[in-house]
Amino acid sequence: MKLSTREADGITIIGLDGSVLGGPDATVLNETLHKLVEKNKKKVLLDLSGVQTMNSSGLSMLIAALTTIRNAGGDLKLAAASRKIESLLVITKLITVFELHPTVKKAMASFGE
């Protein structure tokens, strides 16, 4: 998994690319989120457009990310998931836990609502 970070309109956008399978990748994402919290960056958007595969450990990574940001008083949203990843969220009923948007642009706009 590759991770990239950028900021737009006060929202930190973390792009995930490749396979999200947990393990060392979970540590990298967790460290990135804790650094954001330390900088008081509490609006986080995970761009899943580059994610091809995800397993249960990858789902656990997303849950841990959401918990970290919400415990800091912030919010984390998901955007641009493929049909395969969206189906995984539906099957596991995590679609009721995460706020998923079809595009990064729509997810960014939802922070202002």
Image (cartoon, rainbow, N blue to C red):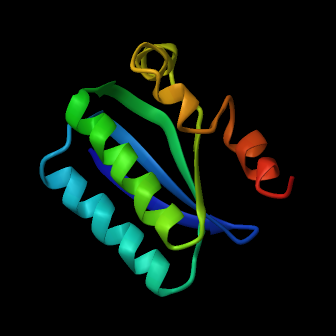
The quadrant where residue 89 appears: top left
Q: Quadrant of residue 88?
A: top left
For residue 111, side relative to residue 67 (left or right): right
Q: Nearer the viewer, residue 101 or 82?
A: 101
Measured as percent of width and height from the top left, residue 95 is found at 54, 27
Can you give x and y, in whole percent of width and height, for residue 44 in the image? 57, 60
Q: Is residue 55 above or below residue 72?
A: above
Which residue is more in the foreground, 73 or 102? Answer: 73
> Which one is nearer the viewer's eye here, 8 or 57?
57
Query: As displayed, is residue 81 above or below residue 107?
Result: above
Tell me which residue sits at (58%, 76%) in the image: 41
Q: Is residue 23 left or right of residue 111?
A: left
Q: Residue at x 74, y 51 (%)?
A: 108
Q: Quadrant where the N terminus lies?
A: top left
Q: Residue furthest left?
A: 23
Residue 52 in percent (x, y) is at 35, 25
User: Residue 29 at x, y = what percent?
Assistant: 32, 59
